[in-house]
Image (cartoon, grey):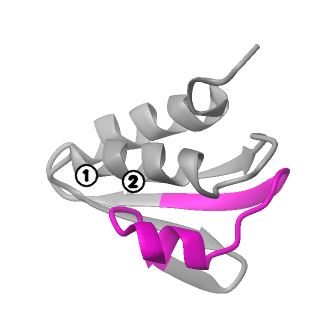
């Protein structure tokens, strides 16, 4: 199961619009995708699950993918997060 530790640098963290963009991107992949923050883990394709993690700016998350297209999904989501969900300067 590929995984990657990342820091969320978006000013509002993974809340509202960034969370929606993240979930829609994750849903495009066939593989299972999980996001962890602290001791909690959620399905990355669930908006309520992602929002319930309470990821704020400069928080560390762990993305894990499993199944068909797992590596591609991980790379795509990593770039999305590093690009501040399209809001990068």
Q: Name the residue under label 2.
A: 23
Q: What residue is drawn where x is 64% and y is 58%? A: 15
- In percent of width and height, residue 59 lies at 80, 58
- Report whether residue 7 is seen: yes
- Secondary structure of the residue carrying numbered label 1: helix
Does residue 49 show up magenta in the picture? yes
38 is higher (above) or lower (below) than 4: below
Q: Do the residues labelled 2 and 1 touch (CB within 8 Å)?
A: yes
Q: What residue is drawn where x is 33% and y is 62%? A: 45
Task: Determine the residue located farthest toward the top in the rendered image.
Answer: 89
Q: Which of 48 and 27 is in front in this view?
A: 48
* Image quarter of residue 34: bottom left
- Secondary structure of the residue carrying numbered label 2: helix
- In percent of width and height, residue 75 lies at 43, 34
Task: Tell me which segment is drawn in magenta.
Answer: 42-63
Along the horizontal axis of the image, is 11 left or right of 68? right
* Image quarter of residue 54: bottom right
63 is higher (above) or lower (below) than 69: below
- In percent of width and height, residue 18 lies at 57, 45
Does residue 7 show up magenta in the picture? no
Q: Quadrant of the image for the C terminus? A: top right
Along the horizontal axis of the image, is 53 left or right of 31? right
Task: Determine the residue located farthest toward the front in the rendered image.
Answer: 16
Q: Mark 1 points at which residue?
A: 27
User: Gap in Å between the C-alphas at discs 2 and 1?
Assistant: 6 Å
Dot 2: within a 10 Å radius of its alpha carbon, few (fewer than 14), some, or many (20 or more) residues?
many
């Amino acid at each position: 199961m590929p995984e990657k530790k990342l820091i969320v640098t978006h000013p509002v963290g993974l809340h509202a619009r960034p969370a929606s963009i993240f979930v829609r991107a994750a849903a495009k992949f066939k593989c299972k995708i999980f996001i962890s923050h602290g001791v909690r883990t959620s399905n990355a394709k669930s908006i309520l699950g992602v929002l319930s993690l309470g990821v704020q700016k400069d928080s560390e998350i762990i993305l894990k993918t499993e199944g068909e297209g797992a590596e591609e999904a991980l790379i795509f989501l990593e770039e999305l997060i590093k690009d501040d969900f399209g809001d990068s300067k």
